[in-house]
Image (tube, rainbow, N blue to C red):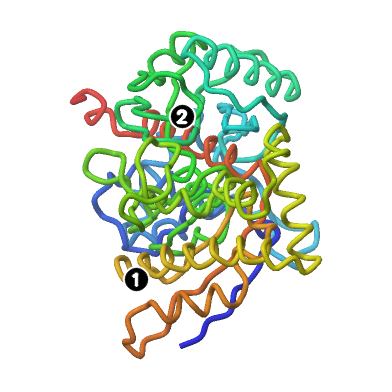
Amino acid sequence: MSRQIRKRAAPEPTTGCGPLIPPLAETSRSLRQQVFERVRAAGLTARVQVARDLGVSPASVTTIVSELIEAGLVEEVATRRGGESGRGRPVVALGVRGAAHRVVGLKISDRDLSAVVMDFAGRLLAEHHEERRPVALAPAALLAVLETLLDRVTAKAGLARQELAAVGIGLPGYVDSTGGRVLWSSILAERDVPLGRLATERLGLPVQVDNDANLCAMAELWFGAGRRLSDFVVVTIEHGLGMGMVTNHRIFRGARGIGMELGHTKVQLDGALCRCGQRGCLEAYVADYALAREATTALNWTHRESQSMAILLESLHDHAKAGNQAARSIFRRAGRYLAVGLANIVNLVDPPLIILAGARLRFDYLYAEDTLAEMNALVLATGRPLPEIEIHAWGEMLWAHGAAALALSALGERLVAPVRDVAAQ
């Protein structure tokens, strides 16, 4: 069955943040955590609504809310029902106390740095973006870059570092989020770097680290189209090819924390060299360096090897739009490989939605209708509807939003977990 691609320029404005988990859909977490997350996701909500959503007594909710208010994590907000005049007693709603804490999300890629500051309720306070030279860094140099980036975005927010509560960091590569270790990254000159610990020591703040594609999925889960979905997949096409997957409203990372490496699945034995050091990876046929490699060979652009990647790709895109068949064939070939990757996702995971994100998506030959048609042809013919495909063009700040969500999630877990759970850790 055919499927059309929908394009979404930015997340629709909503109140609250975090996954909108249906009532009674999750019972593995403590009631205290469920109450807090219900309030955070709603933005503003009444006690009785929380009780109704969670299927518990209003008295239980009242007790927990009192504890959260006393801890300074939740506050009562006077509101009025829609259409009411200024007369009468206002309705008291619950909301996360945004001023309680602030977090920072940092994203470092091969060519860009981005950062955001958010309050505890997920409201954006400041953002910053700049370009960087595409060079692999020693751990000490990377820490210096991260510290400078942190200071610049907090200065924009008018905050001092000691006013922050947590930091989330995203970067490309194999990242063990639980252990805070970067096993390999294109931006690091060394392997197996304990970046979480090193950054915590350098910045003096609790730091969480994750793969950038996971954080792209995290941004959609907390602020975008994935808030109401229990399961979806995000495929990122940027300097590399990444994938993040949400299952049961949570990021799925695999048993050892480094799963979902779509870009490094193999599509050609002894094929093109990937930046990870292996051959035949899907990324080596789709990512920007793959397009540049093909342009240099097929168009005999060896004289352009000194040009920046961005300029070379812009030129390649211009040639394709002007009708140059060799340039068109380069995008067409990359699109066919992308179709293979997307079809494999559908056959393996069967998600209801696949979101395509990343800077390379403006090169529309990579997601043209013929690419989608090829994906359809490669998916198992079951007669069932295919997943929805959406293009999300948030821009460079998407990744930093996901990093901030990572920090908010870890901070919320630490502050809201029941006292007995914390004692048991």
Q: Is residue 258 left or right of residue 38?
A: left
**Pointer 1 with pointer 2, Cβ within 8 A:** no
Crowd tier of the residue under label 2, counting other residues whose Cα lies within 10 Å: few below 14, some 14–19, many 20 or above: few
Q: Position of residue 416 (x, y in %)?
A: 38, 34
Residue plotted at (58% across, 23% down): 135
Residue plotted at (42% across, 43% down): 273
Residue plotted at (35% across, 90% down): 383
Please name whichever residue, 55 or 333, is drawn nearer the observer in this view of the structure.
Answer: 333
Looking at this view, name the residue that lies furthest to the bottom: 383
Q: Position of residue 194 (x, y in %)?
A: 35, 18
Looking at this view, name the residue that lies furthest to the left: 424
Residue plotted at (49% across, 40% down): 212
Q: Position of residue 172 (x, y in %)?
A: 48, 36
Q: Is residue 291 left or right of residue 65?
A: right
Q: Note whether 40 is above or below 21 in the view shown.
A: above
The label on residue 335 is: none
Residue type (three-letter) at the residue carrying disc 2: Glu
- Pointer 2 residue: 70
- Pointer 1 residue: 350
Q: Secondary structure at mark 2?
A: helix
Task: Using the numbered discs, state the Cα–Cα distance from disc 1 to disc 2 in whole angstroms.
Answer: 44 Å
Please name whichever residue, 190 or 322, is drawn nearer the observer in this view of the structure.
Answer: 322
Q: Note whether 420 is above or below 358 in the view shown.
A: above
Whichever of callouts 1 and 2 sits on the residue coming sooner in the sequence is: 2
Residue 116 visible here: no
Q: Where's the C terminus, which quadrant? A: top left
Residue 56 visible here: yes
Q: Where's the N terminus, which quadrant? A: bottom left
